[in-house]
Image (cartoon, coloured by chain):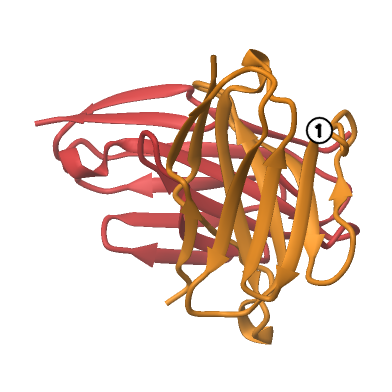
Chain colours: A red, B orange
């Protein structure tokens, strides 16, 4: 059965304290893995797409990496404005219209 | 670019009435539009997938007669919750996949619609 698991469920950091969020997946075939940021009461905002193991992408303080079993979202020197829920989703190889979302990691960055 | 809008952002309706939610891709044509439902502190659950001009494909457990989806054009999809009940109260989010080949795997989300059924 296809599954996506995110950890931790919640993460509290001090401003400037770097950390990583994990997205592990078990799927029959991976077409791509997506990271989104969601603020309360809003729709998810696209961050990154990763397609193959070893791929990395960066945007400001965020860096996403991908292996054959998991993806990490590294946050370097976070700021309070990085506080949000971060969602990962896998796009299946054998079902073009199917995206499985993880339950998200709620990040809180204290000043 | 890649902006998706939803209307209304919030709606309160009485039990037994129907409510329509619109989803529009503002600056691109969408091959496919998706409708999700999100419960508090939970992730997104795909309800249905719709392609312009064809019937929507519903996920298992989603009542197609209750959640009517119409994908009238390459930029507009609507979700109608018929005979709404309090348990239908939720956050409904649509997304759209751009028609342009280079971004065809990505989907861009609308801001969501908070439905409250009293």
Chain under disc 1: B
Residue B103, position as x, y percentages in the image = 61, 77
Residue at 83 percent across and 62 percent down: it is A96
Residue A103, position as x, y percentages in the image = 58, 29
Is residue B53 depicted above or below B99 in this figure?
above
Residue B91, position as x, y percentages in the image = 54, 32
Outermost residue toward the left?
A111
Side of A76 relative to B25 (left or right): left
Is residue A32 depicted above or below A104 in this figure?
below
Mark 1 surroundings: few (<14), some (14-19) or many (≥20) residues within 10 A: some
Residue A44, position as x, y percentages in the image = 47, 48
Image quadrant assignment for residue A19: top left
Q: Which of A22 and A103 is in front in this view?
A: A103
Instruction: Count all numbered tags in the image, as a single digit.
Output: 1
Screen quadrant of the N terminus of chain A: top right
Residue at 79 percent across and 44 percent down: it is B68
Is residue A70 depicted above or below A50 in this figure?
above
Residue B86, visible in the rendered structure: yes
Element under disc 1: loop
Residue A98, visible in the rendered structure: no
Side of A82 relative to B15 (left or right): left
Q: Which of A67 and B85 is in front in this view?
A: B85
Residue at 64 percent across and 55 percent down: it is A33
Screen quadrant of the C terminus of chain A: top left
Side of A29 relative to A9 (left or right): right
Mark 1 — residue? B66
């Amino acid at each position: 059965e296809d599954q996506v698991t995110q950890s931790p469920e919640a993460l509290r950091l001090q401003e400037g304290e770097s950390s990583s969020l994990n997205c592990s997946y078990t799927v029959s075939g991976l077409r791509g893995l997506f990271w989104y940021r969601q603020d309360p009461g809003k729709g998810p905002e696209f961050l990154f797409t990763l397609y193959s193991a070893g791929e990395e992408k960066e945007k400001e303080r965020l860096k996403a990496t991908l292996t054959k079993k998991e993806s990490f979202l590294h946050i370097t020197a976070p700021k309070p404005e990085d506080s949000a829920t971060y969602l990962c989703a896998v796009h299946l190889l054998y079902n073009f219209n199917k995206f499985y979302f993880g339950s998200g990691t709620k990040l809180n960055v204290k000043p | 670019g890649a902006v998706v809008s939803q209307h209304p952002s919030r709606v309160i309706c009485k039990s037994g009435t129907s409510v329509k939610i619109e989803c529009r891709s503002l600056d691109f044509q969408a091959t496919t539009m998706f409708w999700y439902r999100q419960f508090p502190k939970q992730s997104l659950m795909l309800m249905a997938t719709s392609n312009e001009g064809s019937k929507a494909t519903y996920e298992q457990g989603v009542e197609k007669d209750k959640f009517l989806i119409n994908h009238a054009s390459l930029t507009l999809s609507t979700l109608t919750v018929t005979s709404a009940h309090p348990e239908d109260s939720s956050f409904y989010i649509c997304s759209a996949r751009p028609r342009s080949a280079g971004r065809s795997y990505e989907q861009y989300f609308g801001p969501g619609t908070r439905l409250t059924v009293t």
